[in-house]
Image (cartoon, helix red, strand yellow):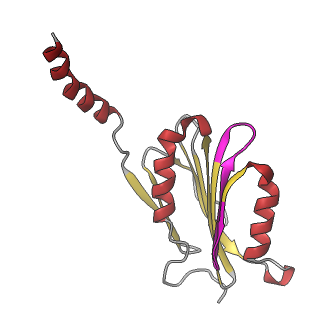
Amino acid sequence: MKRRHLLFLPFLTLSLSAQEKEPEWKTYTNARFGFAIDYPATLEAGRESDNGDGKIFKSKDGKFELRAYAHFLQIDDGDSLDKRWKEELAERGDTVTYKKKGETWFVVSGVQKDGTEYYRKFAVEKGNWATFLITYPHAENKKYDPWVAKIEKSFVPFLKGDHDRVE
C-alpha cells in the first residue's frame, strides 16, 4: 500500500509544477525617456500616457499593478534625489519595512495599512529620473515576490541613445 502512494508523489509534483509555471515575459521600452523594464506577459498593458512618459500594467483581476514612468527633475524648484527620497518616506510613514538609498537611486517597500504591498525604485541621472512602482495584496506575496525581484533586476532606467533628457 505504501508503494502506491510513493509512486503517486512524482506525478503530483509534476502536476503542481505545471500549474505554477513561470509566466512568459515581455520588455517595455519607453522611447521618449529611454528606459526599459520587463513584465509578465499575463499583465495587461495600458496605452502609453499622452505625454509618452510611461505605462501602467495590471493583472486581469486588478490585484497586481506595475507603473513605470520617467521625466525631468525640476532642479530650479529644488527637486533632487534627496528631496524625492524624503517625500517617499514621509508619504509611506510607518508602513516602510525596507529602504535603501545609493548615490543615484533609492528603493522603498512595505505594506500599507489596507494590506497592499508596495515596492518603488527611483533612479536619477543628471536632470532626469525614472521610476517604477509595484503594488499587490500582501496576502499573495509568495506568488508576486518573485515577479518583483525579476522586474527590479530588469529595470534599466537610462538606456543609451537619443532620448528626451536634460544633459
Residue at image position (84%, 80%) is: 78
Which residue in the rendered view is the most extreme toward the front? 2
**Residue 130, percent from left and from top:** 62, 70
Residue at image position (38%, 45%) is: 23
Q: Is residue 41 visible?
A: yes
In this picture, residue 39 sits left or right of residue 126: left
In this picture, residue 148 sits left or right of residue 52: left
Residue at image position (54%, 36%) is: 140
Quarter the N terminus occupies: top left
In this picture, residue 22 sits left or right of residue 46: left
Is-magenta flag for residue 116?
yes
In this picture, residue 149 sits left or right of residue 79: left
Residue at image position (80%, 72%) is: 83
Indicate whether 107 appears above or below 148. Answer: below
Which residue in the rendered view is the most extreme toward the top? 1
The picture quadrant where one finds residue 109 is: bottom right
Indicate whether 17 appears above or below 128. Answer: above
Which residue in the rendered view is the most extreme toward the right? 77
The magenta region covers 99-117
